[in-house]
Amino acid sequence: VDVALDCFEVCGIITDLDVVWSMNHTFMPDLLIILNREDKNISSIADNMGASCVAHDKIALDDDATGGRIDDASCAEGTSLTSPPSYVPHFPLARYNGLNACGRWNLVIRDEFGEDSGFLNSVELIFQID
């Protein structure tokens, strides 16, 4: 899945970026989630997430999160992972600091196995800008 997120209303230099999503999938460890801006500055923000969860409900990724790494997050068998708390991404979102928020962003979700299914229900980029 490749979701284009066009941002043309919040223009300015990024000082902080958080990502919030809701999704479900039959086997979360299969997923690799990548964020990029205009096909540059590509970063894996989640990889090999906890196996027990069947859904993520408004999960917030934040470099300053208190819930630990998203890759290590887990929940009871067959339940959903939620925020709060927020979780630390696979690679820091700070790599986007200093860039202009305006432009095309893409959230790419790769199912590394392909024998199962899921849905991305929502995604939100939250910018703090100068």
Image (spheres, rainbow, N blue to C red):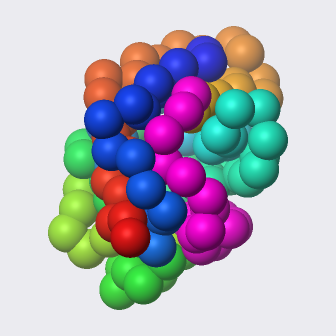
Q: Height in image: 119 above or below 78?
A: above
Q: Is residue 112 left or right of residue 17?
A: right
Camera-side residue of 68 and 12: 12
| Whole-percent x, y for residue 104 in the image | 56, 28
| Whole-percent x, y for residue 47 in the image | 68, 52
Q: Residue at x 68, y 68 (%)?
A: 95
Which quarter of the picture shows residue 120? top left
Q: Is residue 67 left or right of residue 39?
A: left
Q: Is residue 54 visible?
A: yes
Q: Main secondary structure of the magenta part?
A: loop
Camera-side residue of 25 and 32: 32
What residue span does the magenta drawing correspond to? 89-104
Q: Height in image: 8 above or below 20?
A: above
Q: Height in image: 40 above or below 15?
A: above
Q: Is residue 26 left or right of residue 80?
A: right
Magenta residue check for 64: no
Q: Is residue 102 left or right of residue 106?
A: left
